[in-house]
Amino acid sequence: MPTRTKFVFLMHPKEFKKEKAGTGRLTHLCLPESAIYMGMEFETHAEVRALLADPANHCVLLYPGPTARNLSRGELLPEELQGRRLVVFLLDATWACARKMLRISPCLQSLPRIMFTPTAPSRFVIKQQPQEGCLSTLEATHETLLALERSGLDAYADPAQLLALFARMQAYQIDCALNPGLGGYRRKPYSAPGERTGPRGRSAARRQSYLGTATSLAAVNEAT
């Protein structure tokens, strides 16, 4: 699916091993205008540095926070790009790992940040999100494209494609979990995301205060 925006998925090594539930790689395969790089520190990463240094690019980081500009509210306008290509960096990692990746990569810290208001809660059935508003990498990319199209920054030709692939991936995993002859067999079926007990404790409170009620954690989640 072609896009004007280039998506760059920065994958933590731990996510690279998650072949069953990782959606970053699946999303990358769906978007010709995307790249995926594995690592923890990207300050010296040649490809990342080249993208950042290219004057034809307008680079941003999809990451929530008080300075992030909400695409869903039209806070990034097409004329601000001044003809440059929008390049969106996403951290494909858990909350804790993403914070570390950001901390040791000053080049990412200095990027303008964007976010969006999710149009729907996470559809992840086989994993529980760490906080309300957290989405898988695939869902975050889908929401970003929706917001970019509404702002006139991109054209999202087939909004159903990514979510359909996400549903198919999960359906396969659920079928495997119901097969007692396979190693991943579960005696109890997966519960619906809305029926699960929410996270508690200091970490949950810290995430919620950081995210607020109208942000997306984007790729920074416990179930990418």
Image (cartoon, rainbow, N blue to C red):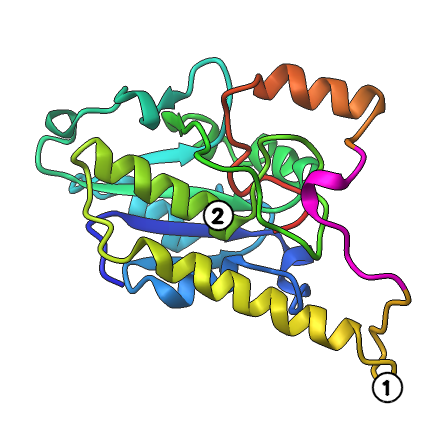
The numbered disc on residue 100 is none
Q: Reading the chain from its start, which is encountered first: label 2 or label 1? A: 2
Please tell me whether mark 2 or mark 1 is closer to you in this view.
1
Give the total number of marks visible in the rendering: 2
Residue under pointer 1? 181
Q: Is residue 31 above or below residue 138?
A: below
Q: Residues within 10 Å of mark 2 (few under 14, many from 20)?
A: many
Mark 2 → mark 1, Cα distance in angstroms: 31 Å
Q: Is residue 218 magenta?
A: no
Looking at the rendering, in which quadrant would you find the N terminus? bottom left
Amino acid of disc 2: Glu
> Which of the 4 image quadrants contains residue 67?
top left
Q: What's the residue at 25%, 24% (across, down)? A: 76
The secondary structure type at the circle numbered 1 is: loop
Q: Which residues are magenta?
A: 188-197
Residue 58 in view (yes/no): no
Q: Residues within 10 Å of mark 1 (few under 14, many from 20)?
A: few
Residue under pointer 2? 139
Residue 113 x %, y %: 40, 26
Q: Is residue 56 above or below residue 201?
A: below
Q: What's the residue at 85%, 22% (across, down)? A: 201
Residue 57 x %, y %: 21, 41
